[in-house]
Image (spheres, rainbow, N blue to C red):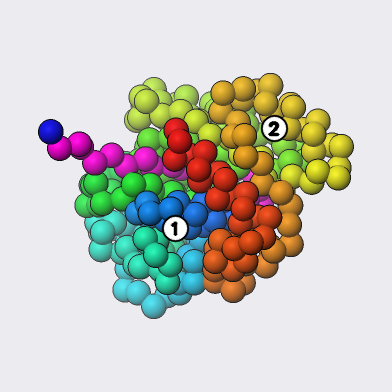
């Protein structure tokens, strides 16, 4: 009997800015793609950092995820190959910044992305939706379309701040739009092993997310911060770096379920 193709769709979310959502999306996406999985990154952030971080210039194309959300363009029509094997991107452009206002009077405005995804049904093993640092309509679209939520958490004193609010939004989406949605993966980023605070924060996050916290921890390293300006995920930019190794280990953890 033919096995039904199944796509895991992660919304990568945390309304806190600069915690490593985009870095995790591109690096983990690339690591899974290099391991032979077909991976699509959907850039839902008007800043377009996932798009440029994958070496793609979103302005070159007629359509972007803006047209997907506002004009009902199927996501398949905006998917572009990156220069990296098995890795594809649905690019974001700056016009996405105004879309929450533009969508207010649109029917089923929370389900625009979910419906657009039907056009790539079964084509990818993993889809990563890189969310903006907010819990507005764009992120709700990601939550409605996702099968799971992945939350990168920066290993710092206020790491857990905002996660109660995030959980409340997830509950609302469960009740109204996507009954099986859950936060399944929490990832500690920018971990500094020389700093005792990092260990304390890790213990605190584990207490709140005992089953969700990934074993693999992402270290703070300059190479990870440098990679985006070269338009390359870390696993290509510096394959032997600590950051690349960490994201490959995380990919293994994800593939092993
Ligand atoms: N492990 C790391 N070590 C060092 N720098 C990192 C690490 N992870 C991410 N960075 C850098 O920190 C900054 C924020 O990371 P990133 O863009 O991935 O966060 P984000 O959550 O997507 O931010 P935003 O909320 O603005 O979308 C970037 O400059 C990135 O290069
Ligand atoms: Mg980002």
Which one is nearer the viewer's eye here, 147 or 203?
203
Dot label at residue 160 = 2
Q: What is the secondary structure assignment of the residue under circle 1?
A: helix
Alpha carbon distance from label 2 to label 1: 32 Å
Circle count? 2
Dot 2 crowding, Cα within 10 Å, few <14, some 14–19, many 20+: some
Q: Which residues are magenta?
A: 2-22
Which residue does the image show at 54% across and 71% down from the upper left? Answer: 231
Q: Is residue 176 above or below residue 148?
A: above
Dot label at residue 34 = 1
Dot 1 crowding, Cα within 10 Å, few <14, some 14–19, many 20+: some
Residue that extends furthest to the front in the rendered view of this protein: 240
Q: Is mark 2 within 8 Å of ligand 1?
A: no
Q: Position of residue 123 (x, y in %)?
A: 26, 51
Q: Nearer the viewer, mark 2 or mark 1?
A: 1
Whether residue 41 can be seen here: no
Q: Quadrant of the C terminus?
A: top left
Majority secondary structure in the magenta region: loop
Q: Quadrant of residue 142?
A: top left
């Amino acid at each position: 009997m033919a096995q039904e193709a199944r796509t895991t769709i992660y919304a990568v979310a945390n309304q806190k800015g600069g915690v490593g959502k985009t870095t995790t999306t591109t690096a983990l996406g690339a690591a899974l793609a290099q391991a032979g999985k077909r991976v699509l990154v959907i850039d839902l952030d008007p800043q377009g950092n996932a798009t440029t971080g994958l070496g793609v210039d979103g302005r070159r194309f007629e359509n972007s995820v803006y047209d997907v959300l506002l004009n009902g363009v199927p996501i398949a029509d905006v998917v572009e190959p990156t220069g990296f094997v098995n890795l594809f991107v649905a690019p974001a452009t700056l016009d996405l910044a105004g879309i929450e206002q533009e969508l207010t009077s649109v029917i089923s405005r929370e389900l625009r992305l979910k419906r657009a995804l039907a056009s790539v049904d079964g084509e990818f093993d993993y889809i990563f939706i890189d969310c903006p640092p907010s819990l507005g309509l764009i992120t709700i679209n990601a939550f409605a379309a996702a099968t799971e939520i992945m939350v990168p958490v920066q290993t710092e004193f206020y790491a857990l701040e905002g996660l109660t609010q995030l959980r409340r939004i997830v509950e609302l989406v469960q009740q109204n739009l996507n009954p099986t949605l859950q936060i399944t993966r929490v990832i500690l980023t920018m971990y500094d092993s020389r700093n005792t605070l990092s260990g304390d924060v890790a213990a605190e996050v584990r207490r709140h997310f005992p089953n969700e916290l990934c074993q693999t921890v992402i270290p703070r390293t300059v190479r990870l911060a440098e990679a985006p300006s070269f338009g390359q995920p870390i696993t290509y930019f510096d394959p032997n770096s600590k950051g690349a190794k960490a994201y490959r280990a995380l990919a293994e953890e994800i593939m092993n379920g």
